Amino acid sequence: MPATMMNLYENVCLRCGQTVYQVDRIGPLKDFTFFHTGCFKCFTCNSKLTLKTYCNNQDSQEDKEVYCSSHVPKPGPGHLDGDAVGIRSALNVPRSAQFVNDQIRPGGRPSIDGDAMGLKSRGNGSGTGSENGHNSSFGEYKYGRFDSSALHIAHALNATKIQRVYDKPIDHYLDVALQKQMEMQHRLEEDDLYKKFAKQRAAEEAKMDDYIKEEWESELEKLTAQFERDLATKRRSREDSKVLTVKHQREREELEKNMTIKRDMKKENLTRKMLEHERAATAALVDKHSKEMMRLIQEKRSEYMEEEEVIDHYPAQPPPPMPPPQTKTDIYMDPDEFAEVDQLAIQVAQEDQKTFTDLVRMLVGHCASDVEKVRTIFRWITVKNLNSITFDDSAHGDTPMGLLRGIKYGTESYHVLFKRLCSYAGLHCVVIKGYSKSAGYQPGVRFEDNRFRNSWNAVYVAGAWRFVQCNWGARHLVNAKEVPKPGGKSKSDSLRYEYDDHYFLTDPKEFIYEFFPLQSEWQLLKAPISLHEFEELPFVRSLFFRYGLYFPDEHTKAVMYTDSTGAATIRIGMPSHMQSSLIFHYNLKLYDSDKDQYDSVSLKRFVMQSVVGQLVAFRVHAPCSGALLLDIFANAVTPREYLTGEPMKFKSVCKFKIVCEDLQTVMVPLPDCASGEWGPAKATRLFGLEPVTHHDALVFAGRDLELQFRMTRPLTDFMATLHKNGSEEKRLSKYVSHRVHDDLVTFTLSFPEEGQYGMDIYTREVASMDTTNPTEKHLLTHCCKYLINSSKRN
């Protein structure tokens, strides 16, 4: 599979004609058109629009542009185009309280559900009363046609359809006592299973102890017999007997030590095998219980739906795995849309519940859609920080901590618990097993054993199977050394719960970069890939997708091979709205060790990082044959944050193995300049300093050179330094100077000899007169750098 598979969602912006990626996309709108977020403005007055405020030209089907309400073209006076507006027949619909739509979208905002209101487009036929849960006597009535496209709300209707309210809250059709009754039956079966585990462990440990004891006694008997034989031959000499006694004592101690190590190793292996067996048995039991709970919920829900004459849109049986028809951004654009349900999950996580029934009903009792239900369960698990819970050894199954005893004993994973909770909420969920590019993985590693085996979930919501990885999504508490005790008075109000939203309903085309299921159908891809293709995919992390990054070159793979000169280039694309805030960094070291130097020179000096437009390039020049590891980091910061000069934290977005099989050209390191990108793009992006004379990172010059910039905002205290391999920076300082005239900054260089030079430029903003923030720092900060080749021939 080509590395550009994640770019299959590309569309073209109607306004600027450039590619629109998911993270920067508005649409689909009229006639399946798309816009960049920055281009989504009124065609006439250029005012910024939203999905709530934009309008289309209803007088022309050819005009696909968007307008504000003040400038949208309107039909002539006295003219009502019933066909264009699509409401002519709708005007004849009788007013009846029976057809009032009482659906509400998540968060209490009113929504329009075309199916619920019995409004269908002409192509799909008219809605009927029976389809919408109304009296069948209205079934022959021809409802008014509702042209969603003409009314420019197709996108809103699609979003409503995706987050459809499938049924009433579970309290409406399933009695709490009945669900708890089944839970208690399940708990008894679980108790029996844990008793069985304890009995098996005790029996296996006793068996192992007996084996070790027999082996110890046998070896000790052999050792003693040998000692007695040696002593009999040396009986005449007291000194010899003393030596033999000391030797025997030393051999006995050595035997005891070896037997202890052997016993510990056997016990460790036994515990691991027993735990694997117990996890499998627990997962099988939870699977059985989940099916029984789902069956109970489906039966009661069906009975309720029949009585209320309402169609149940959620499938009674789990559908087969198929690629989802919509992307994650079609379901929600911003995690803040779940602010209310997220807060609910956090509040519930502060307390402990005695039953799963109580827990799940507290989580999903007020959720309006299946998406909200799975969201609260996901957030509860990511907030609960199950790995740090302190368990009381006396905790029974009917206590709050006894509820999570599977986590305590290691027999139940996040994924099995997630599946259990989903079943209590009436949601189909499966546990998927396979490989993951998890901790310890490096690009180029083959999945030949069980080192990187992992599990995750797929849950059926929004009309399709979608991935959830609770364990990787958990980020738990930030700025907290310990978890506050529930109900206790502490500084918990100042704590901030973080999580990784990437692992909630992740799109298959992104999920496949980190997870490979053993069953190919659970890739949820239209064209599943092989394990070898999975290994070849670039090693990316969730931040890569969060920033909307992509690989523009199809040949980009986890392992990149250099050419005969030892050069290989990695290119990464970024969306236009992130271009001004993303800062990249990198680290280069030997693949099989942590060494980051070659011949006492930092390997970073063998990488040239540059930014041109929306592409950042890392050109690696291997100094020797062999394998290198390139780790690329990124961070999104504002120019104001960067100009403070404070240290920035970078997180890894992707890694590559760089292989140089045959180096025919000896590479010299780049001049020892400040780390980071080469070229003036950084100066423009963060300082508003625009290059006038030299726009590229690489400059070819004679013995003299002038570089000019234009300031777009006040800067001061410019400083430039020269670097050259084999020359001291202090000696080169007299060969570079600068002058400022109005808004022009000119750097003058006179090179003492031919060769390759690096030039660093520093500056800072002029301190503002703003007295509201007198402590704001204005430090001298690195602005940009150039690589200059000086030669008489230039």
Image: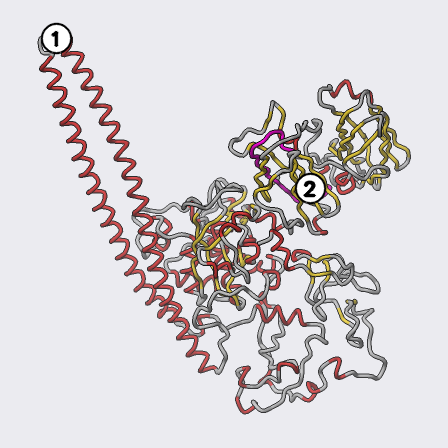
Check disc 1: other Cα within 10 Å, few if <14, some if 14-19, many if 20+: few
3D distance between C-alphas at marks 1 and 2: 81 Å
Q: What residue lies at 72% left-to-right and 51% top-to-bottom?
A: 576
Residue 767 visible to the viewer: yes
Q: What residue lies at 53% left-to-right and 89% top-to-bottom?
A: 136
Q: Amino acid at mark 2?
A: Ala
Check disc 2: other Cα within 10 Å, few if <14, some if 14-19, many if 20+: some
Q: Which residue is mark 2?
A: 617
| Disc 2 secondary structure class | strand
Q: What residue lies at 66% left-to-right and 85% top-to-bottom?
A: 144
Position of 122 relative to 233 (above/below):
below
Range of magenta residues: 621-639
In x, y percent, where is residue 419? 42, 60
Q: For residue 238, which numbered disc appears in the image?
A: 1
Find out whether residue 146 is within the magenta segment: no
In x, y percent, where is residue 610? 72, 39
Q: What residue lies at 81% left-to-right and 27% top-to-bottom?
A: 790
* Front residue (pair 434, 383): 434
**Would you say the magenta stretch is mainly helix, strand or loop?**
strand
